[in-house]
Image (cartoon, rainbow, N blue to C red):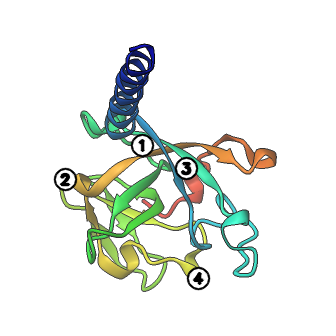
Amino acid sequence: MGSSSFLWNFTKKFVTFGLITVTVSDRYVTVVPVRGGSMSPTLNPKTSSSAGNFSDDYVLVEKICLDKYKFSHGDVVVFSSPLNHKERHIKRIVALPGEWFGSRQNYDVLKVPEGHCWIEGDNAAASMDSKSFGPIPLGLIRGRVTHVVWPPHRMGAIQSPPREGLSSL
């Protein structure tokens, strides 16, 4: 009788812990890996295909910002790709809804539509971003990257570049 009571208590605690973990991960905060070099040097400064996952940064993503879509210039965000909703990308917000934006590629001036933002990777040469698929709907954003949590020597908050370092007008 004692072992079934122990098993039942263990199962209840395990299920409770699992439900709390899923809720926190879905609604408040999660940790995601950064793949590729499109955000280098901010994230994955030494991208190496031979090192694989051991050199990838892991970042803390807060999701409370999604409540009212509170974003700022320079925020690094995780979003679903407009071309394939199963893919997630990490890029920096360069222009917010309703702002005019100067493109460095072809010197066009564009207005970001309401409900959208313009995102770019820090490493323009290796980044698939708004230059490839235009402004992205705010509804595709899955959270704001706040800290690097792995590897240990890179732990710390994500820094936003100065406003003049961004492309918006």
In-image side of 131 versus 40 (left or right): left
Q: Residues within 10 Å of mark 1 (few under 14, many from 20)?
A: few
Residue at (37% x, 38% y) in the render: 63
Q: Residues within 10 Å of mark 2 (few under 14, many from 20)?
A: some
Mark 3–mark 1 distance (CA, rounded to whole Å)? 11 Å
Q: Earlier in the sequence, mark 1 or mark 4?
A: 1
Q: Earlier in the sequence, mark 3 or mark 1?
A: 1
Q: Earlier in the sequence, mark 3 or mark 4?
A: 4
Circle 3/circle 4 CB separation < 8 Å:
no
Q: Position of residue 121 (x, y in %)?
A: 52, 68
Circle 3/circle 2 CB separation < 8 Å:
no
Question: Disc 1 marks which amino acid?
Answer: Ser
Mark 2–mark 4 distance (CA, rounded to whole Å)? 27 Å
Q: Which residue is mark 1?
A: 72
Mark 3–mark 4 distance (CA, rounded to whole Å)? 21 Å
Q: Residues within 10 Å of mark 3 (few under 14, many from 20)?
A: few
- Disc 3 is placed on an element classified as helix
Q: Which residue is mark 3?
A: 163
Q: Which residue is mark 2?
A: 115
Question: Disc 3 marks which amino acid?
Answer: Arg
Q: Position of residue 113 (x, y in %)?
A: 19, 61
- Disc 2 is placed on an element classified as loop
Q: Nearer the viewer, mark 3 or mark 4?
A: 4
In-image side of 154 versus 102 (left or right): right
Mark 1–mark 4 distance (CA, rounded to whole Å)? 24 Å
In-image side of 153 versus 107 (left or right): right
> For the N terminus, which image quadrant?
top left
Q: Position of residue 49 (x, y in %)?
A: 69, 81
Q: Which residue is mark 4?
A: 125
